[in-house]
Image: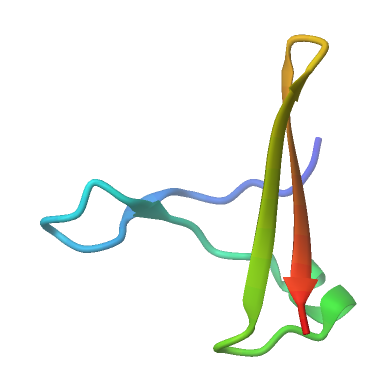
């Protein structure tokens, strides 16, 4: 099993949710506050595949 994070509401009035990026991923990609991340989402063989790529 991979990392587990918890979703929280982005703002009280928002329908958007946010989560925390695990520390191991932050270290691996040397991420900092303000960095941008590209989320590629696709369905494959009945599963949802999410590829996350930092944009540096």
How many numbered discs sit on the rendered protein? 0
Q: Is residue 25 left or right of residue 5?
A: right
Q: Is residue 52 left or right of residue 11?
A: right
Above or below, 25 against 31 in this view is above
Residue at 76% x, 72% y is 54
Question: Residue 38's image quarter?
Answer: bottom right
Q: Quadrant of the N terminus?
A: top right
- Residue 16, given in percent of the width and then of the height, sits at 31, 50
* Front residue of this view, candidates 49 and 28: 49
Above or below, 27 against 16 in this view is below
- Residue 41, given in percent of the width and then of the height, sits at 68, 39
Residue at the top extreme?
46
* Front residue of this view, candidates 24 and 44: 44
- Residue 45, given in percent of the width and then of the height, sits at 82, 11
* Front residue of this view, candidates 28 and 41: 41
Residue at the left extreme?
13
Residue at 75% x, 56% y is 52
Residue at 63% x, 84% y is 35
Q: Quadrant of the C terminus?
A: bottom right
Residue at 71% x, 47% y is 40
* Front residue of this view, candidates 6 and 55: 55
Q: Is residue 33 left or right of residue 38?
A: left
Q: Is residue 43 left or right of residue 34?
A: right
Question: Residue 25's image quarter?
Answer: bottom right
- Residue 46, given in percent of the width and then of the height, sits at 74, 10
Above or below, 6 against 23 in this view is above
Question: Residue 29's image quarter?
Answer: bottom right
């Amino acid at each position: 099993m991979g990392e587990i994070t918890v979703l929280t509401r982005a703002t009280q009035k928002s329908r958007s949710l946010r989560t925390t990026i695990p520390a191991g991923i932050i270290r691996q990609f040397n991420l900092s506050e303000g960095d941008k991340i590209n989320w590629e989402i696709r369905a494959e063989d009945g599963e949802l595949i999410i590829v996350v790529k930092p944009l540096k």
